[in-house]
Amino acid sequence: MASDETTVAVSVVMLIRRELEDDYVGIWKVPWHIRRALPNAGDDQVQKIAASILGDLVAADVALGDLDEETGTFLPWLATGAAEKVMAAWRDLGRDPNIGDVAWLAKNG
């Protein structure tokens, strides 16, 4: 990644981790933060940065998964392949995820 992309990725990881202190975070927040920092970034660039961010978060202490719509319970996915699953679903959308799309992030423990 270029240095500006790395800087954005580190910044977004820190923002997401801070948000996770209070609640679950929808995956839609990742591209939202990236596009605010890099307004001229294309979709491929945003997805490349997002994949790095998700990989870093999952490697640390963040889980990806679903929220049960009835109970609000977080249903974690297996960490192995979780970031790739999100990115595949994102590509299948053909656009950036919106609120409630694809997955949620939650702090482990």
Image: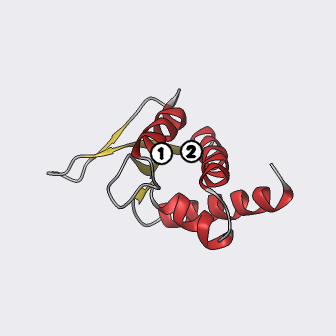
Q: Amino acid at mark 2?
A: Asp
Give the labeled residue for mark 2: 61
The answer to whether the residues at label 2 and label 1 have Cβ atoms under 8 Å apart is yes
Please tell me how crowded label 2 is: few (under 14), some (14-19), or many (20+) other residues with Cα within 10 Å. Answer: few
CA distance separating discs 2 and 1? 5 Å
Q: Is residue 55 left or right of residue 99?
A: right
Q: Residue at x 67, y 71 (%)?
A: 37
Which of the pair 89/55 is nearer the observer? 89
Picture residue at 44% right of the left edge, 51% below the top: 106
Amino acid at circle 1: Asn
Query: Counting other residues with Cα less than 10 Å from the Cα at mark 1, is it few (<14), some (14-19), or many (20 or more)?
Result: few
Numbered-mark total: 2
Quarter of the view holding residue 75: top left
Q: Residue at x 59, y 54 (%)?
A: 43
In the rendered image, the residue lying farthest to the right is 3
The percent coordinates of residue 40 (x first, y second) are: 68, 68
SS under mark 1: loop
- Seen in the image, is 16 located left or right of residue 75? right
Q: Residue at x 40, y 33 (%)?
A: 77
Tell me the residue that label 1 is attached to: 108
